[in-house]
Image (tube, helix red, strand yellow):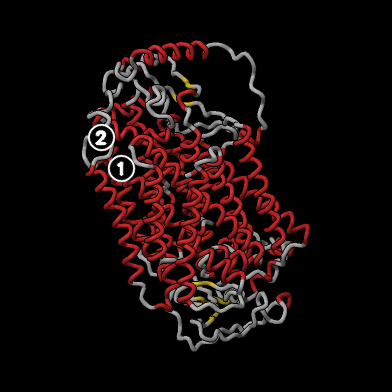
């Protein structure tokens, strides 16, 4: 999640940030208990043992084995494309749900959530409320449309609704976003781990990419989902082992809760409406809902997994299971941060410069206090590696789908590609994108500030993409000019804000860290000149904090100071608003020419039940009487259930495809004159799909349109 990532990358100097000392709690350093931390940990400055390496190697080997197994057992070559990208649309819902949740939990987040709790408190935990808002919206508003048009790439929908230009723009943005993001998401935690565990950062990154490329390029979606399930078990197991050992070490829940409470770390309802406040209830819940909507509603990796199960009911069940899994991981992660603060309440390792960045906090804690338990440190690092593997694998599989569906088939619709060749192309695309992302690691490590820009870019692009899908599904008047100009305007705006914030070094309000202390540090941690220097520096810092600054800081433009959590909301809202305005100015699209299957079901119901006078104003007078075929235009191909097909689907009847001798027809109702030549987007009323799995179209009078039933 962006918040944890932003915290991780921006808090390397956390000890120097302004800190609020709660009134009446200046004597926190006198508390009893293991707050001072022992010199060099419980068993000295231990590094990885052979047991730790064995645990880590086992996790990596199992991940590779899964990919090789599914790659060797791919079966019928004619099913290669559908199997590789969608798992044959026959994946069990539970593994898919776990895989969906695992793809959202990055290694940066695992390290960042813990340090976020340690430095800033629990406000960001309210992201769990955002999950509860976004999941039902995804289930009822967006998911039915994807299932209705049977997409492999989510961007196929944008071509059906707005045209090839909008589809190409969204697909290109996704490719840039994910290629850059995966390299950062792997490099940042590897760097943190290497600083405190002794693991070579290049070896760690190479292992992650090598394993990922092997199992994602060989086994496809099946391997990704099954491996994600195994890795999620490792990830959650490692979190709970560290949590349990740490909780027992500090004295249990009562001690943990008390030490967080008196330092004002337990904060859930900061209702400050100022949008420049980094984490408030509004930015985390409202702004965070937009961010999570970009992940659940319009992210290619997520949509691809929704299409990997057989029915929409299974996809909806998986959504709620993934929501619960995310909430559990977030809660455990934040409680671990509370445990670490309870242990370090009197000897902050950031203040003592035992670590140089906040994202090193969790691995430092594990290595200092648990490395003597052979295998525990290895299990913890395996959990972090698992999070990185899940992130990269989901990205590579989705990038392969975008390459084949949006660029190969979308850019050259006249070229016929055999299913087995499309599958081979997808495998090569997955491997090539893995190699490109790996190469970018060696670029981003030398660019410093680009890391934060890359992480913010993830939210910026997601908001614009969400806006394009929302514009198409909720507003039948929107046209292709509106979608294109809306997306370009929003992209320019959020890029200006995000890059401007980084260049100006703007500090967001409420970014000050909570109280920490080094009063109980053992003498062996601060000895001789170091102890004198630290004491002197602390005195100077304390004295300086009581004085007024000699000169006020130069004011920073207000948009640069906006909380990063609003970036997705700004991108989405700008895309929709500009898109509607441009559509109205350039001539809105006649709603009766929009295939109802391309609109969100609640929107269709709402439009059909508006008062007659309002329907006339909105040019909806004939919409409920029109009948449409939801079979996609010939120029929009999809790899779905057995090859490259033109397809539609009924939401209320998901049964096996009828025999291939059937012919697609829609002759029972005359097409609208505005569609021209009796066609939908140029598609003839009757067409024979030679050599491809075919579907018979039957009427659905309840919706006033034709659906191709599976």
Q: Residue furthest bottom?
A: 661
Q: Characterize the local packing of mark 2: few (<14), some (14-19) or many (20 or more) Cα atoms within 10 angstroms.
A: many
* Mark identifier at residue 370: 2
Q: Residue at x 62, y 57 (%)?
A: 468
Quarter occupied by residue 562: top right
Q: Characterize the local packing of mark 1: few (<14), some (14-19) or many (20 or more) Cα atoms within 10 angstroms.
A: many
Question: Which of pointers 1 and 2 lies earlier in the amino acid sequence?
Answer: 2
Question: Dot 1 corresponds to which residue?
Answer: 380
Residue 266 in view (yes/no)? yes
Q: Residue at x 57, y 36 (%)?
A: 563
x then y, percent, for residue 301 = 48, 58
x then y, percent, for residue 23 = 44, 15
Between residue 301 and residue 467, name the one nearer to us: 301
Query: Is 668 located above or below residue 1 in the figure?
Result: below
Please tell me whether mark 1 sits on a helix, a strand or a loop: helix
Between residue 99 and residue 210, name the one nearer to us: 210
Query: Is 82 located above or below residue 498 in the figure?
Result: below
CA gap, disc 1 to disc 2? 10 Å
Left or right relative to 357: residue 234: left
Q: Residue at x 44, y 54 (%)?
A: 392
Left or right relative to 131: residue 461: right
x then y, percent, for residue 580 = 70, 55
- Cβ atoms under marks 1 and 2 closer than 8 Å: yes
Left or right relative to 666: residue 87: left
């Amino acid at each position: 999640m962006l918040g944890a990532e932003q915290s991780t990358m921006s808090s390397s100097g956390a000890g120097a940030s302004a800190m609020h000392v709660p009134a009446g709690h200046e004597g926190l350093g006198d508390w009893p208990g293991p707050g001072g931390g022992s010199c060099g940990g419980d068993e000295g400055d231990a590094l990885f043992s052979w047991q730790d390496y064995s645990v880590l190697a086992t996790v990596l080997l199992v991940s590779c084995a899964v990919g090789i197994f599914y790659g060797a057992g791919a079966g019928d070559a004619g099913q290669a494309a559908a199997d590789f990208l969608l798992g044959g649309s026959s994946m069990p819902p539970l593994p898919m749900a776990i895989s969906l949740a695992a793809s959202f939990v990055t290694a940066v987040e695992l390290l960042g959530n813990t340090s976020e709790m340690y430095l800033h408190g629990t406000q960001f935990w309210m992201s769990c409320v955002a999950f509860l808002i976004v999941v039902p919206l995804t289930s009822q508003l967006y998911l039915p449309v994807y299932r209705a048009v049977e997409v492999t790439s989510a961007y196929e929908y944008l071509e059906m609704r707005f045209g090839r230009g909008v589809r190409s723009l969204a697909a290109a943005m996704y490719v840039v976003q994910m290629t850059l993001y995966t390299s950062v998401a792997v490099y940042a935690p590897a760097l943190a781990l290497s600083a405190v565990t002794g693991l070579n950062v290049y070896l760690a990154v190479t292992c992650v990419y090598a394993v990922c490329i092997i199992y994602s390029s060989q086994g496809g979606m099946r391997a990704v989902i099954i491996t994600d399930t195994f890795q999620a078990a490792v990830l959650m197991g490692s979190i709970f082992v560290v949590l349990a050992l740490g909780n027992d070490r500090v004295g249990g829940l009562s001690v943990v809760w008390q030490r967080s409470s008196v330092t004002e770390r337990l904060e859930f309802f900061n209702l400050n409406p100022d949008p420049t406040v980094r984490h408030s209830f509004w930015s985390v819940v409202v702004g965070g809902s937009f961010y999570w909507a970009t992940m659940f509603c319009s992210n290619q990796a997520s949509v691809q997994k929704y299409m990997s199960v057989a029915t929409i009911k299974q996809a909806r069940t998986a959504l709620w299971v993934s929501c619960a899994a995310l909430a559990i991981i977030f809660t455990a992660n934040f409680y671990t941060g509370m445990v670490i603060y309870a242990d370090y309440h009197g000897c902050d390792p950031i203040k003592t410069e035992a670590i140089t960045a906040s994202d090193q906090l969790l691995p430092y804690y594990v290595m200092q206090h648990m490395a003597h338990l052979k295998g525990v440190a290895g299990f913890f690092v395996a959990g972090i590696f698992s999070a990185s593997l899940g992130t990269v694998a989901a990205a590579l599989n989705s990038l392969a789908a975008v390459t084949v569906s949006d660029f190969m088939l979308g850019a050259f619709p006249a070229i016929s590609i055999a299913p087995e060749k499309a599958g081979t192309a997808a495998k090569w695309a997955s491997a090539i994108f893995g190699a490109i992302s790996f190469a970018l690691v060696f670029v981003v490590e030398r660019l410093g500030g680009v890391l934060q820009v890359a992480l913010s870019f993830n939210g910026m692009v997601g908001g614009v993409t969400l806006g394009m899908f929302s514009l198409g599904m909720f507003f039948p008047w929107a046209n292709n000019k509106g979608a294109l100009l809306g997306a370009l305007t929003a992209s320019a705006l959020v890029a200006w804000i995000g890059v401007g914030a980084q260049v100006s070094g703007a500090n967001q309000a409420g970014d000050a860290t909570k109280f920490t202390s080094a009063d109980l540090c053992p003498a062996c941690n601060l000895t001789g000149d170091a102890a004198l220097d630290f004491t002197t520096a602390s005195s100077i810092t304390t004295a300086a904090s009581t004085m007024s600054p000699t000169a006020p800081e130069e004011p920073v433009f207000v948009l640069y100071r906006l909380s990063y959590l609003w970036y997705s909301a700004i991108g989405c809202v700008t895309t929709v608003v500009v898109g509607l305005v441009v559509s109205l100015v350039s001539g809105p699209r006649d709603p009766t020419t929009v295939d109802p299957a391309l609109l969100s079901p609640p929107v269709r119901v709402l439009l059909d039940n508006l008062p007659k006078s309002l329907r006339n104003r909105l040019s909806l007078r004939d919409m409920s009487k029109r009948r449409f075929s939801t079979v996609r235009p010939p120029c929009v191909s999809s790899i779905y259930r057995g090859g490259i097909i033109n397809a539609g689907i009924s939401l209320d009847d998901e049964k096996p495809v009828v025999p291939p001798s059937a012919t697609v027809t829609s002759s029972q109702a005359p097409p609208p004159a505005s569609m021209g030549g009796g066609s939908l987007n140029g598609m003839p009323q009757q067409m024979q799909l030679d050599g491809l799995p075919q579907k018979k179209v039957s009427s659905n009078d309840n919706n006033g349109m034709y659906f191709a039933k599976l």
